[in-house]
Amino acid sequence: MLSRWRIWTRLKLALRKRPVPQPQLPYDLDEFAKLLSSRDPRALKQLASGLAVRGAAEPGKLSSPR
């Protein structure tokens, strides 16, 4: 009986819906890729300032790409 309970529990955990991770960037992915691949220093400064504003909004968390 205990093994049935373990199998049932593992099956339920394996089949549960997990939340889809959302990007925590202040830009949509196309705009972010365009700014990141740009060789223009103004575009890179814009990207850095946008990311800095996002990081300042949550001082207790490290921003990491997911």
Image (cartoon, helix red, strand yellow):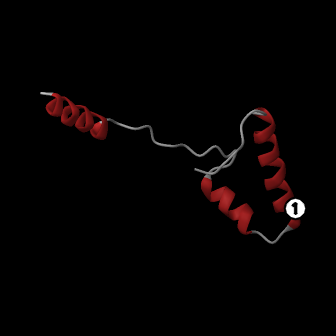
Q: Residue at position x 84%, y 49% from top?
A: 49
From the viewer's side, name the closer residue of 39 and 63.
63
Name which quarter of the figure residue 43 lies in. Answer: bottom right
| Amino acid at pointer 1 | Arg
From the viewer's side, name the closer residue of 28 and 6.
6
| Residue bearing the label numbered 1 | 42
SS for callout 1? helix
Which percent across, then down, holds residue 50?
79, 47
| Crowd class of label 1 (few under 14; some 14 to 19; many from 20; radius 10 Å) | few
Specify the farthest residue to the front. Answer: 2
Vertical relation: 37 (above or below) 45 = below
Which percent across, then down, holds residue 31?
67, 57
Q: Residue at position x 87%, y 66% from top?
A: 41
Which percent across, then down, holds residue 35?
74, 61
Name which quarter of the figure residue 39 lies in. Answer: bottom right
Q: Is residue 19 left or right of residue 37?
A: left
Which percent across, then down, holds residue 4?
14, 32
